[in-house]
Image (cartoon, rainbow, N blue to C red):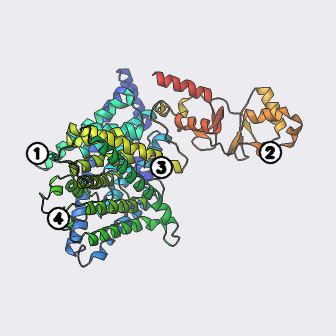
């Protein structure tokens, strides 16, 4: 197998002496790392914008040259309809091959969840091949018809650009995390033409750090990426600037009067419920696939894509007479495949509900079928292991559900515009499923440039987010982390803990005990050295657990039992050690869960004990960071 990860490390690794000399010279000139970070953030913005353009171009080529071409050529929406699911299934199989080549395999962590784990555990030092792997696997998933969106992959690719820039510059780990956030903000800002929403996505979803030190470079990266992406499209299309997803001037009035505001609260609750269903299905589809013992994990993405294709087939059969399906984006278009943005734009068109557009037949039944089919297709595609984002499916589900609710309210005699409910529903589902209401509100405002949408989306987004949090407790990106025992924590105050890693702390001496020592010996050593907590290692030097001062004091109260008990019989083997690269947030969580005063810290080899981190030292550093 090609060791692509090792190759990536060699490509980005500059000689350490060069980096040191450059940083020393900049320090002599009075250039601090915070200042250098501004220039690196700009570089990340340029790189992320170029990567976003390349990603979009490859998807367009695959969709037009593979999916739409084959659907039209072989009439896969007509007499050969049952062969349609094979197209996304081929893409799912290709995704498994890509992951095997890159050495990723079938991991429970894909997409932004893996980036979040890196931010928590490694302060943003991502795999150097992550960007290339995401670009290839996501373009194959979306370009072949898989139900997924391109925005989250672009954020991952941008994050990878930021990590590579940080590795090339050799900056500190805390600044590396900021550059990863810069890349994510740059990608979202470029494709949506929404720099404020991109900044909020990085701060609210990924870094959860609103400090000025983090905010400034992320803003610069987002602005640079947006203007660069505009420039590329303007040069490519003769001066016409085009985003990945553009909402035209909204012709339907968004009524923010007091009488209609309760309707938007209802819409928010509906959108929150749909977000819960989508998240639950995505979380469990992969688990259900593992129960099918005869199908190896390698084929799960292909199976999920095939089932997603069957959802498209069923939808085409049910909506055979609806001109909406055929004319939304040409003869090769299937509504729920890929991003589904043409369908979203139809749902936002006021004429689609008033009969002003003869090519569109939007009814409550059509919209409900589209919504349900998209939820199932997305759950099969992404839950089965396909590569892509949940942004586009969330916008699709919100637009169709909002349009259906608007039509229902109109049927009840209310004077409402269904397209306005479709518009607000988009932001509400997205805000709920990624647990970022502020980002969802600002994104919708930036897409529409219509201030009238603010009050409705604020009510709907907050209602949807609250319902989702009550039921699910975690965003769709942090649920996989919870399964492996990683807690993300709250945004407020946690940024101070994420900025510092264990290797930056002053560690205390670590007394070592062996599992075959008696507690009587440990009591004597404790009295002679004033040591309270002991790190227990086996004969090979491997970490086994902790013997705490509380355990020793219990024995001292009954000294007659000390010669009879061995260390291995009373150690706390359920306490994991810290690594030098862990953030203080990880240590905070371990202290809280195990009620300890000290934790063992192991070196990079996972064996050698570097020392012990005390709870008091962590609290002092926390207050220092909060004051800074």
Looking at the picture, does residue 347 appear above or below residue 204?
A: below
Tell me the CA gap for discs 2 and 4: 76 Å
| Residue at image mark 4 | 327
The answer to whether one can see residue 187 in this image is no
Residue in view at x 52 percent, y 27 percent: 622
Tell me the CA gap for discs 3 and 2: 40 Å
| Residue at image mark 1 | 239
* 1 or 4: tag closer to the N-terminus: 1
Q: Mark 4 near mark 3, Cβ–Cβ under 8 Å?
A: no
| Residue 396 percent across, percent down from the top left | 29, 55
**Residue 319 figure quarter:** bottom left
| Residue at image mark 2 | 516
Tag in front: 1 or 2: 1
Tell me the CA gap for discs 1 and 4: 28 Å
- Check the image and name the residue furthest to the right: 560
Q: Which of 246 and 575 is in front in this view?
A: 246
Tell me the CA gap for discs 3 and 1: 43 Å
Quarter of the image with the C terminus in it = top left
Tag in front: 4 or 3: 4
Q: Nearer the viewer, residue 558 or 123?
A: 558
Tag in front: 3 or 1: 3
Query: In the image, which disc is placed on residue 479?
Result: 3
Residue in view at x 53 percent, y 70 percent: 293
Left or right: 292 with respect to 61?
Answer: right
Q: Mark 1 near mark 4, Cβ–Cβ under 8 Å?
A: no
């Amino acid at each position: 197998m090609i060791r692509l990860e090792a190759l990536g490390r060699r490509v980005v690794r500059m000689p350490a002496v060069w980096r040191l000399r450059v940083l020393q010279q900049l320090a002599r000139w009075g250039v601090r790392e915070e200042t250098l970070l501004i220039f690196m953030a700009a570089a990340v913005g340029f790189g992320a914008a170029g990567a976003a353009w390349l990603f979009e171009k490859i998807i367009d080529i695959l969709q037009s040259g593979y999916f739409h071409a084959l659907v039209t050529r072989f009439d896969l929406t007509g007499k050969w309809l049952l062969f349609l699911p094979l197209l996304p299934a081929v893409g799912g199989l290709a995704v498994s091959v890509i992951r095997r080549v890159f050495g990723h395999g079938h991991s429970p962590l894909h997409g932004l969840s893996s980036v979040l784990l890196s931010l928590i555990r490694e302060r943003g030092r991502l795999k150097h091949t992550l960007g290339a792997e995401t670009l290839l696997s996501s373009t194959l998933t979306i370009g072949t018809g898989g139900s997924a969106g391109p925005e989250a992959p672009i954020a991952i690719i941008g994050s990878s650009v930021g990590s590579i820039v940080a590795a090339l510059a050799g900056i500190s780990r805390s600044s590396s995390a900021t550059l990863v956030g810069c890349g994510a903000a740059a990608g979202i800002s470029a494709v949506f033409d929404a720099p404020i929403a991109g900044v909020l996505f990085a701060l609210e979803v990924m870094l959860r750090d609103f400090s000025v030190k983090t905010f400034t470079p992320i803003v610069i990266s987002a602005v640079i990426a947006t203007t660069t992406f505009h420039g590329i499209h303007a040069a490519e299309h003769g001066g016409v600037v085009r985003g990945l997803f553009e909402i035209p001037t909204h012709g339907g009035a968004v009524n923010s009067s007091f009488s209609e505001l309760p309707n938007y609260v209802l819409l928010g609750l509906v959108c929150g419920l749909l977000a819960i269903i989508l998240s639950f299905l995505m979380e469990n589809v992969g688990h259900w696939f593992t129960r099918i013992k005869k199908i190896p994990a390698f084929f799960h993405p292909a199976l999920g894509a095939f089932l997603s294709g069957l959802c498209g087939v069923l939808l085409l059969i049910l909506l055979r007479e609806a001109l909406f399906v055929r004319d939304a984006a040409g003869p090769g278009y299937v509504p729920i495949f890929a991003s589904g943005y043409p369908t979203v734009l139809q749902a936002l068109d006021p004429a689609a509900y008033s009969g002003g557009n003869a090519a569109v037949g939007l009814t409550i039944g059509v919209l409900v079928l589209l919504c349900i089919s998209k939820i199932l297709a997305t759950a099969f595609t992404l839950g089965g292991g396909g590569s892509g984002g949940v942004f586009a499916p969330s916008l699709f589900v919100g637009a169709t559900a909002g349009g259906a609710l608007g039509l229902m309210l109109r049927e009840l005699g209310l004077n409402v515009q269904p397209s306005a409910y479709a518009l607000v529903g988009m932001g509400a589902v997205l805000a709920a499923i990624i647990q970022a209401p502020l980002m969802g509100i600002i994104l919708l405002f930036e897409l529409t440039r219509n201030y009238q949408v603010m009050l409705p989306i604020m009510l709907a987004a907050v209602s949807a987010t609250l319902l989702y949090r009550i039921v699910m407790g975690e965003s769709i990106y942090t649920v996989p982390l919870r399964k492996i025992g990683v807690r993300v924590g709250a945004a407020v105050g946690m940024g101070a803990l994420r900025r510092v890693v264990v290797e930056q702390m002053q560690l205390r001496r670590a007394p070592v005990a062996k599992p075959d020592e008696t507690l009587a010996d440990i009591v004597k050593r404790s009295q002679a050295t004033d040591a309270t907590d002991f790190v227990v290692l086996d004969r090979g030097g491997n970490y086994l657990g902790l013997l705490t001062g509380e355990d020793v004091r219990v024995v001292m109260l009954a000294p007659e039992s000390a010669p009879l008990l061995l260390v291995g019989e009373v150690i706390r083997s359920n306490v994991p050690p810290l690594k030098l690269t862990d953030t203080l947030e990880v240590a905070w969580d371990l202290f809280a869960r195990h009620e300890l005063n000290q934790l063992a810290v192991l070196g990079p080899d996972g064996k050698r004990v570097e020392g012990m981190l005390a709870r008091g030292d962590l609290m002092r550093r926390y207050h220092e960071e909060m004051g800074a």
